[in-house]
Image (cartoon, rainbow, N blue to C red):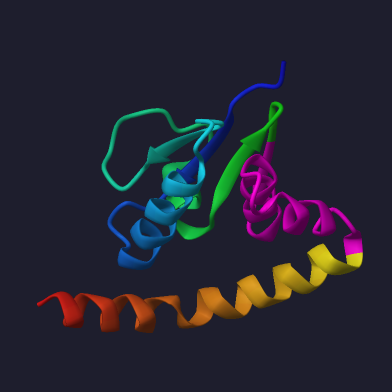
Amino acid sequence: MRDKLEIWYDGACPLCTREIALMRRLDRRGAIDFVDVSTPGGSCPIDRKALLERFHARENGVMLSGAAAFAAMWRAIPLLRPLGLIARWKPVLALLERAYLRFLKIRPRLQGLLRERRA
């Protein structure tokens, strides 16, 4: 039996909480353990600051970050599994990682826009 996939996310980030809410709904088998690292304490396998800066997952004992972590999450959800399997192909994963790095640059602005909409 495979270990449960662990996902660490920033619960103070409105983008992250929306994404994780969707993934929780899609994870009907309960294959993923979602861990909010936005507040001190809790289980942090690596530096908490690093967990907040990039998306992280632990799949079968292996720590992953960025696009590789997203791909692991997709593989754990039957509906998204084909995307996660395609992402195992190195050229695809490299492309996804480049897109993720671009997203990280605009993430603060997107967070601000979502926070303004909530206010």
Q: Residue 38 placed where, x, y %?
A: 31, 48
Judging depth in this view, the residue of 25 and 38 nearest the camera is 25
Q: Quadrant of residue 113?
A: bottom left
**Residue, far top:** 1
Is 61 left or right of 119, judged from the image as shown? right
Look at the image and tell me in which quarter the C terminus lies: bottom left
Q: Residue 16 placed where, x, y %?
A: 40, 60
Image vertical order of residue 34 relative to residue 38, above or below: above
Q: Residue 9 placed where, x, y %?
A: 43, 49
Q: Which residues are magenta?
A: 63-90
Residue shown at 37%/52% (left/top)?
Answer: 21
Is 29 left or right of 52, judged from the image as shown? right
Judging depth in this view, the residue of 20 and 57 nearest the camera is 20
Magenta highlight on residue 54: no
Residue shown at 74%/53% (left/top)?
Answer: 84
**Residue, far left:** 119
Residue shown at 43%/55% (left/top)?
Answer: 22
Residue shown at 54%/54% (left/top)?
Answer: 55
Q: Quadrant of residue 15?
A: bottom left
Is 34 left or right of 88, judged from the image as shown? left
Q: Residue 34 placed where, x, y %?
A: 44, 38
Image vertical order of residue 93 relative to residue 41, above or below: below
Q: Does the magenta stretch mainly form a helix, a strand or a loop? A: helix
Image vertical order of residue 93 relative to residue 32, above or below: below
Image vertical order of residue 41 relative to residue 48, above or below: above
Judging depth in this view, the residue of 28 and 4 nearest the camera is 28
Look at the image and tell me in which quarter the N terminus lies: top right
